[in-house]
Image (cartoon, helix red, strand yellow):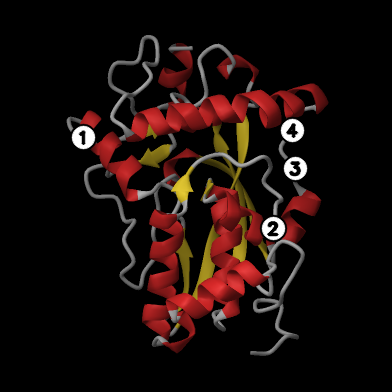
Amino acid sequence: MNPADPHLAKTRLLDFDAPSIAKLIEERGWAELHRYNRIGAIYDFVRNEIAFGYNRADDIPASAVLADGYGQCNTKGTLLMALLRSVGIRCRLHGFTIHKALQRGVVPELVYPLAPSEILHSWVEVETDEGWINLEGFILDAHFLQTLQKEFSDTESLCGYGAGTDCLSAPPVSWSGGSTYIQKTGIINDFGTFDAPDDFYLKYRQSFGFARDLLYRHVLRQWMNARVRAIRRGVLPRVPGLSRPNHSHEETNRAA
């Protein structure tokens, strides 16, 4: 491993030298796997063993995400990058914003109007033997996604409940050597690539404001995580006026 390579370097957020991460790598034996299987095993771990959920902030270290045992696009991406770099896989972050409608159903209706219209989003780009690929499909764990597929079996397009896809019945989320996606249809702005999440969050931060940031950290995210757990059990919070969600932002907003 070349520590001077910016796509392999350790950073404050990509703290793959943390004891908990080093122990995980050793216990799983990921470093001994063939490159293709190395990427796939780590991807599957982050996707399904780190459940979908909301951490206290986007810019927390990978070791903190691992300790929480859950995360969303940005925090699970940080952990994925740290694990990949720890076994010599080059990776970088691609930053975006997504429409807040993608979070509808997870964000309680009472506070949904207070949410920023655009939410900070990212996926991980990984260098494989075939070139660079995009990994976004790790965000929703399989159990959570299967609940959405069962509930919305009569539609392929969904922008809500944490998903943004036009192929809900069979979204490209499983590792097969190519790009994976699960929130792509909600993307609004493209900020380009960054060597590390640290660089991204230095330049872009979620515009909650001080009061709403405190509300999110101490009240709202616990409420959202409770709703995520309910969805995973098959109990979906209803979105008023929206009986059959789709990825039309204007239609979703009219239901507010």
In the image, is residue 142 above or below residue 44?
above
Q: Residue at x 43, y 32 (%)?
A: 228
Whole-Å distance between the Cαs marked 2 and 3? 16 Å
SS assignment at label 4 = loop
Q: Do the numbered discs 2 and 3 sit on residues whose CB atoms are within 8 Å?
A: no
Q: Which mark is residue 73?
A: none
Outermost residue on the left side: it is 154
Q: Disc 2 on helix, strand or loop?
A: loop
Q: Which residue is mark 4?
A: 207
Disc 4 residue type? Ser
Which residue is disc 1 drawn over? 150
In the rendering, at what x and y percent does residue 67 appear? 59, 54
> In the picture shown, does residue 52 fall above or below 112?
below
Whether residues under marks 4 and 2 lie with C-beta atoms below 8 angstroms apart, the answer is: no
The earlier-in-sequence mark between 2 and 1 is 2
Give the image location of residue 25, x and y in percent: 52, 76
First-in-chain label (2 vs 3):
2
Residue density around tag 1, few if under 14, some if 14–19, many if 20 or more, within 10 Å? few
Relative to 110, is 47 on the left or the right?
Answer: left
* Residue type highlighted by circle 2: Pro
Task: Tell me whether the residue at label 2 lies in contact with that at label 1, contact meaning CB atoms closer than 8 angstroms.
Answer: no
Q: Please name the residue that numbered disc 3 is placed on.
A: 205
Could you tell me how far apart the alpha carbons at marks 1 and 3 are, in whole angstroms? 35 Å
Q: Is residue 137 left or right of residue 206?
A: left
Q: Which mark is residue 61?
A: 2
